[in-house]
């Protein structure tokens, strides 16, 4: 059971830091909370020859890996929500755990700079500092803590003498300037010790920028953590090795998000850096095999370059997300050449051969690049809309079919009516669309109301309900081993995907949304490394995965929320309105553009 802990202002005095006095926001970031998931009905069985269970995840809360060490490592006990070293009868043996602080332990060039803790693409003005370490433990004996460099040089260490029975936090100040190339954080239970650890946390001084900007920067940092600057691709999850499992949809979202956070008046990333990143991404994707013009869903690095990942498909919706993102990013960065090349790539998509007998566009092609997938895009929602709009760029007179169940998202899944509005302002209007007669704004607002009401009605006493949390959407399941799709049309849903909060945030009143995000931050669901992937409604646990797709959704949603909050021009929507190509795309739904600005422009939308 995950423990929720709060700390008084007096705790900050123990750190010897100025954070409490200067007003610098100070937040705890878990390196790892040692909770463990056991599926209902499954008898927990320790790993053979060991006293610990397999953890439900093989990664830390930082999106890195961890492991065990010492002569008595096989005797470490991890069968509940704590890790215990039982060395009372071991006068000569020690055991412990190591945790990589950046990338995988076997990737020596990836380190954590405690003076600028987020990815290096982010400007110094928006970087947080790490100035403290917290260890939650109980027992008696001696515990040594170490931080080492990629060259195994000890940068910091401290040994604690433990003499208490109940779990309590021990806080230790750190000097960020001496920890510029930190790689591993380890704890070692010394011989004779009987010690149990609940978790390790880093004390983070957040950047002193307005809260709306800090929210956006944190979301972008989560996404940027998945970016491989060497290849130009974005991996599906931060804890994977570069080149192992890269996502084309996430790569596109990263391109657009980078353009957004570099747009005036923001300077989270410099405009020069943004243009370089978009160019690099475009070059990388241009080298991929694209049968019928369709991009792979996932790719991996091989001896001959990046190729489709075995067992996956060429995906029309990932292709749509990627090209809508790149076209917008090119327009936002005023890169006409990139825009022309992206539009040319879209023109090469053979939608005639991608059409199924029912008239819908296929979900894509099998791994062989020739066989159409059996199912197509016909359910109402933003995914189908993006694919159909991409086809409209190629051929405005192409055969088209109405969507099924207009205005009703399948299973009431949250992201479905929102994804198109990450790219287009037109769906903020309440005029009936030309294809199905749907009033998109009404449908989206109805979904938001249903999402908020579901938790209050179904789990009224839960932590999520008390926080005002919601998000019956889609993403990795709570156990971290399967994809989970939830929705308000399903009964007894108990797993939330909070990315929907930010995807739908522009529909809500900004001050209330930022207050909700602050509550989630205090409850541990929105730490400095980004919003959690999934959470149990009762607050007992969460999935700390740094997944790039939902990070992309969160970043773009946070940008739209900021623009509305500040009532400033929305750079994504301005680019969407300027682009002749994207106006042709959205003309499928809204062919008659109103004279002058859309009403939403006045409020930054």
Image (cartoon, rainbow, N blue to C red):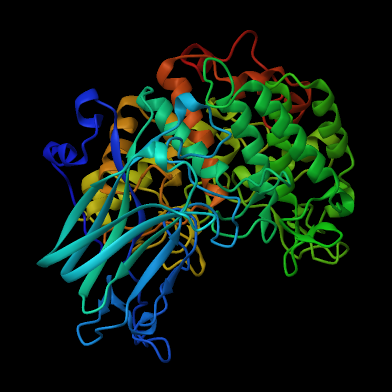
Which quarter of the rendered picture does the N terminus lie within?
A: bottom left
> Residue at horizontal 26%, vertical 40%?
519
393 to 301, vertically: above or below: above
Is 275 displayed left or right of 508 in the figure? right
18 to 137, vertically: above or below: above
Is 315 displayed left or right of 506 in the figure? right
Residue 56 can be seen in this image? yes
Seen from the viewer's position, the closer of residues 572 and 19 is 19
Is 535 displayed left or right of 113 in the figure? left
> Residue at horizontal 45%, vertical 40%?
117
Seen from the viewer's position, the closer of residues 387 and 29 is 29
Res. 570 image quadrant: top right
Res. 581 image quadrant: top right
Can you give x and y, in whole percent of width and height, for residue 410 in the image?
53, 54
Residue extending farthest to the bottom is 49
57 to 455, vertically: above or below: below
Can you give x and y, in whole percent of width and height, for residue 500 in the image?
45, 44
Seen from the viewer's position, the closer of residues 344 and 145 is 145
Is 1 displayed left or right of 584 in the figure? left
Seen from the viewer's position, the closer of residues 185 and 566 is 185
Can you give x and y, in whole percent of width and height, for residue 209 in the image?
38, 23
Can you give x and y, in whole percent of width and height, for residue 416 in the image?
54, 47
> Residue at horizontal 19%, vertical 83%?
88
Count up the numbered dots: 0
197 to 415, vertically: above or below: below
Residue 417 can be seen in this image? no
């Amino acid at each position: 059971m995950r423990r929720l802990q709060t700390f008084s202002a007096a705790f900050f005095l123990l750190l010897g830091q100025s954070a409490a006095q200067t007003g610098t926001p100070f937040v705890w970031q878990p390196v790892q909370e040692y909770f463990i998931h056991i599926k209902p009905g499954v008898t927990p069985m320790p790993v053979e020859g060991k006293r610990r269970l397999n953890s439900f995840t093989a990664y830390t809360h930082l999106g890195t890996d961890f492991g065990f060490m010492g002569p008595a490592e096989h005797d470490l006990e991890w069968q509940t929500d704590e890790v215990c070293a039982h060395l009372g009868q071991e006068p000569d043996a020690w055991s412990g755990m190591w945790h990589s602080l950046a990338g995988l332990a076997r990737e020596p060039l990836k380190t954590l700079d405690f003076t600028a803790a987020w990815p290096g693409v982010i400007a110094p003005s928006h970087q947080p500092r790490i100035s403290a370490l917290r260890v939650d433990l109980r027992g008696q004996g001696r515990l040594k803590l170490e931080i080492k460099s990629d060259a195994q040089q000890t940068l910091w260490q401290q040994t604690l003498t433990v003499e208490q029975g109940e779990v309590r936090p021990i806080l230790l100040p750190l000097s960020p300037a001496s920890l510029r190339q930190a790689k591993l954080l380890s704890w070692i239970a010394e011989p004779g010790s009987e010690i149990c650890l609940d978790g390790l946390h880093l004390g983070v001084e957040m950047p002193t920028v307005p809260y709306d900007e800090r929210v956006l920067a944190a979301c972008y940092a989560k996404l940027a953590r998945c970016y491989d600057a060497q290849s130009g691709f974005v991996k599906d999850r931060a804890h994977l090795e570069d080149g192992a499992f890269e996502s084309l949809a996430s790569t596109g979202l990263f391109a657009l998000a980078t353009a957004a956070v570099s747009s005036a008046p923001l300077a989270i990333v410099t405009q020069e850096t943004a243009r370089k990143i978009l160019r690099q991404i475009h070059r990388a994707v241009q080298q991929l095999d694209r049968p019928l013009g369709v991009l792979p869903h996932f790719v991996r690095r091989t001896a001959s370059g990046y190729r489709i990942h075995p067992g996956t498909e060429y995906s029309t919706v990932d292709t749509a997300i990627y090209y809508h993102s790149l076209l917008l990013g090119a327009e936002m960065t005023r890169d006409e050449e990139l825009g022309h090349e992206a539009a040319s790539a879209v023109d090469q998509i053979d939608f005639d051969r991608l059409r199924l007998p029912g008239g819908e566009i296929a979900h894509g092609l099998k791994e062989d690049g020739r066989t159409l997938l059996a199912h197509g895009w016909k359910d109402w929602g933003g995914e189908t809309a993006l694919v159909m709009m991409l086809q409209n760029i190629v051929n405005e007179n192409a055969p088209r079919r109405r969507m099924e169940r207009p205005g009703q998202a399948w299973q009431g899944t949250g992201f479905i009516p929102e994804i198109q509005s990450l790219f287009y302002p037109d769906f903020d209007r309440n005029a009936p669309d030309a294809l199905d007669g749907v009033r998109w704004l009404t449908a989206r607002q109805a979904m938001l109301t249903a999402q908020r009401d579901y938790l209050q009605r179904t789990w009224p006493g839960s932590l999520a309900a008390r926080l005002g949390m919601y998000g019956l959407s889609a993403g990795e399941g709570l156990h971290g081993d399967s994809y989970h799709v939830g929705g308000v049309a399903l009964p007894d849903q108990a797993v939330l995907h909070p990315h929907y909060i930010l995807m739908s945030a522009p529909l809500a009143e900004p001050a209330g949304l930022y207050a909700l995000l602050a509550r989630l931050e205090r409850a541990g669901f929105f730490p400095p490394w980004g919003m959690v992937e999934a959470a149990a409604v009762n607050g007992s646990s969460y999935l700390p995965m740094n997944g790039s797709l939902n990070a992309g959704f969160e970043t773009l949603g946070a940008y739209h929320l900021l623009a509305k909050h500040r009532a400033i021009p929305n750079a994504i929507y301005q680019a969407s309105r300027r682009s002749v190509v994207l106006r042709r795309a959205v003309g499928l739904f809204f062919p008659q553009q109103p004279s002058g600005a859309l009403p939403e422009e006045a409020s930054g939308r």
